[in-house]
Image (spheres, grey):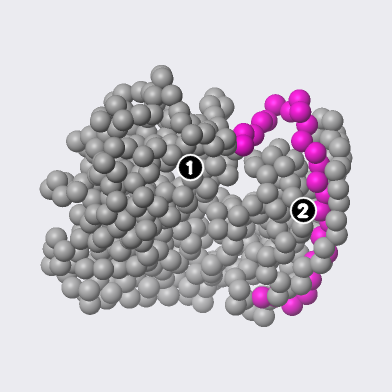
Amino acid sequence: MQTLHSRLSAAIIFTGLLTLLSPGAVPAQSQADTPPAQQLAGPQATTSVAARIPGAKKRLSKNFTLKGDSDWLDTGIDVASGEHVVVTAKGTIRYADAKADNGPDGLSRGFKDLLRILPYNAAGRGALIGRVGDADVAQSFLLGASGDVAVPVGGRLSIAINQSKNDTGDGLYTVRVEIIAADATASTTFTVAKTVTSLPGIDDSLFEKIPRRIGDKAGNPGDMVNFLILGSETGMQNVFTAAGWVKVDSDVQNTIVHGLITSLEKQSYLTMPMSQLYLFGRSQDYGWAHAEPIDVVRSRNHLRIWKASFTVNGETVWVGAATHDIGFERDERNNGLTHKIDPDIDLERDYVEKTLCGTGLVTQVSHFLPQNPMREARTATGGSFHSNGQVLILKLAETGKDLPATSNNQTNQQSNQILLVGHQVNAR
């Protein structure tokens, strides 16, 4: 059995590999702070908005200044579902280690960006970005020098420079924000999730078919089943992707190879595999993860989901168990090292609700308390958790359309420097 020391040694070796591939060692990959590349161009240009949005009507406009050391700026603007946030921005900032000034489109991404923690990891450092809604769950999006973004759900608009808190630039951007009212006849519609006290078919007879907990291969009971999703497989994948969750690899070896390749291609990577756990006599059909760059091994929101063999009013039922990794602890099964979950697992259930409802792809939300609800228990690895016993129920809006294939790439936020560490820890 590997010791923690040997695991960390493997991590150091892998880090050394990355050092050999650093900008100094690989000149062809050292252009980390040059003017933005074409693939990182800002969103659709803001010229002739009325021509691009049928019936477009400007509801309001405001001007702002973002200094190079600014944090997120609350614009004071509340936007509604389906409205367009149209931005034009000018100015330059300069980072101490950069070779040139950059504008609101940001610097081109380079190898060093694998080790940076950026609010929006799919765009370059220094880009103008935005978000709408709760800071804890809202997904950042690129605005750039000229941006037009239709927001899926309403909330307070904030803007920022895409940079880490300890890596600020010298200079400023002037930003003009226009809010274009949603067109009632537009083909793209968004849904505001409605909270209901009950849903047809969600009752105790349904939960007689659903085990209360998932387990490991040996049958040891583990995480609590704490959410259900009603909707098609395409709808389920769409809502997680739109919310910034990333589908997790199921094969450790492929993950390491993929991680090395994406390092060389200057891409971020989040799909560190989860262990196989079981419900309905089989391992999970899907694993999804949400995490910050660098911290993905130590701390990440993650869940497993299974397709049920039965339906509810003709709707496919997806049964899930979500937990939040917050560190490491001893695995009581084998005395190894494993992830420690936040014992208040209701917080993770609520996190799933907030992130998915923020996509505009959920129509109804409910909570159900089964008979003899689970209040306290231990995972298969020995960690304790507690809950009020409620199960989250989400009913999806079926749009009949898949999300763009690039959506998943825009949310991958994993630094490969710590990738191998994850494979030396017993997965959860």
Relative to 341, is 74 on the left or the right? right
Q: Is residue 323 visible?
A: no
Instruction: Check residue 154 for magenta coloring.
Output: no
Where is 1 relative to 390, above or below?
A: below
Q: Quadrant of residue 92?
A: bottom right
For residue 341, the mark is: none
Residue sitting at x 21%, y 68%? 330
Residue 221 x/y as whole percent: 19, 48
Q: Is residue 32 visible?
A: yes
Q: Label 1 amino acid? A: Phe
Residue sitting at x 76%, y 25%? 185
Instruction: Check residue 186 for magenta coloring.
Output: yes
| Disc 2 target residue | 77
| Disc 1 target residue | 240
> How many C-alpha atoms fall within 10 Å of the one at disc 2: few (<14), some, or many (≥20)?
some
Q: Which residues are magenta?
A: 168-192
Relative to 41, is 272 on the left or the right? left
Residue 171 x/y as whole percent: 78, 75
Relative to 116, is 340 on the left or the right? left
Residue 346 x/y as whole percent: 40, 52
